[in-house]
């Protein structure tokens, strides 16, 4: 009977990797509602393209890392899916953004999402050995992931200031909390600090968000602009409100 429920370390790592793929996929799909609105209205309105450009390069880095690192195919697959999502989002910006935003998006995407990752791959493949390639890719993964995980701090400050959780839709915050926790456990068992550092940080911030929900959820919430702000949160995957609201062209 005991053998039926006995799992090896590799089995647990695989299970956590699969769960991490599911939760990460849900996080990547979070902006779909916003982009459906963009397609319907044929306008990007006040939304910024920079979050998606940055998330695309982050996905590229994790795909490269997952390919280079032995037994990390699950890291590569889910971020490959995420890269496809972000490419679609960036293309929709290029299609529906006003001229000035379209030009800025094209330049930034060309430099950050085409030129930079291509240069990293070419240089590391030509001049570095495999272990050094893994380290370089891992450092870039940590850098871009930490930058993304730092953005909830602004939203959390807004929640505390307004005593309202309207700026943090529960499901997205919950999935980010679960996602960070799953990948942190995965990283501990796999002894991979490149995965553990940013996701451990994300798990800590996700825990803080859940605590804020427990504190402020039942308080009266102002209704003004709540729909647009929720869309903005989903649109930027926790990019701050002040970064989202910019004058229209």
Image (tube, rainbow, N blue to C red):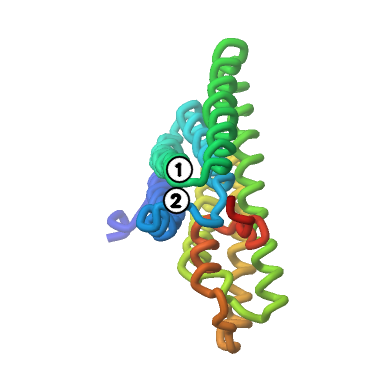
Name which quarter of the figure residue 233 lies in: bottom right
Left of 189 or right of it: where is 153? right
Measure the alpha-carbon separation of dots 2 and 1. Answer: 8 Å
Q: Residue at x 49, y 72 (%)?
A: 227
- What x and y, as percent, mark residue 119? 58, 20
Can residue 191 be seen at all in this image of the molecule?
no
Query: Which residue has dot 2 on it?
Result: 28
Left of 79 or right of it: where is 107? right
Label of residue 86 in the image: 1
**Viewer-proximal residue, 90 or 180?**
90
- Binning the other alpha carbons within 10 Å of mark 2 as few (below 14), some (14 to 19) or many (20 upward) gives many
Q: Along the polypeptide, which appears first: circle 2 or circle 1?
A: 2
Relative to 186, residue 210 above or below:
below
Q: Residue at x 56, y 36 (%)?
A: 103
Label of residue 158 in the image: none
Q: Quadrant of the N terminus?
A: bottom left
- What x and y, as percent, mark residue 240? 64, 59
Check if mark 2's residue and mark 1's residue have beta carbons within 8 Å: yes
Q: Residue at x 35, y 57 (%)?
A: 40
Relative to 111, residue 93 above or below:
below
- Say how many tags the image has: 2
Query: Closer to the camera: disc 2 or disc 1?
Result: 1
Label 2, secondary structure: give it: helix
- What x and y, as percent, mark residue 11? 38, 46
**Viewer-proximal residue, 56 or 180?**
56
């Amino acid at each position: 009977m005991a053998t039926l429920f006995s799992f090896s370390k590799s089995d647990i790592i695989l299970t956590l990797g699969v769960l991490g793929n599911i939760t990460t996929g849900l996080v990547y799909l979070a902006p779909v509602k916003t982009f459906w609105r963009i397609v319907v209205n044929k306008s990007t309105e006040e939304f910024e393209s920079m979050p998606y450009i940055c998330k695309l390069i982050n996905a590229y880095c994790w795909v490269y890392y997952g390919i280079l690192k032995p037994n990390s195919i699950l890291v590569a697959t889910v971020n490959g899916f995420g890269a496809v999502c972000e490419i679609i989002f960036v293309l929709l910006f290029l299609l529906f953004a006003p001229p000035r935003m379209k030009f800025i998006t094209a330049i930034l995407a060309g430099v950050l999402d085409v030129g930079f990752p291509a240069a990293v791959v070419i240089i590391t493949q030509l001049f570095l050995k495999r272990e050094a390639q893994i380290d370089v890719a891992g450092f870039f993964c940590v850098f871009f992931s930490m930058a993304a995980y730092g953005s909830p701090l602004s939203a959390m400050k807004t929640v505390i200031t307004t005593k309202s959780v309207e700026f943090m839709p529960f499901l997205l915050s919950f999935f980010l909390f679960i996602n960070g926790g799953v990948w942190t456990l995965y990283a501990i068992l796999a002894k991979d600090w490149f995965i553990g550092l940013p996701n451990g940080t994300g798990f800590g911030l996700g825990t803080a968000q859940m605590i804020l929900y427990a504190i402020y959820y039942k308080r009266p919430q102002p209704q003004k602009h709540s729909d647009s702000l929720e869309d903005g949160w989903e649109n930027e995957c926790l990019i701050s409100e002040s970064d989202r609201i910019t004058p229209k062209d």
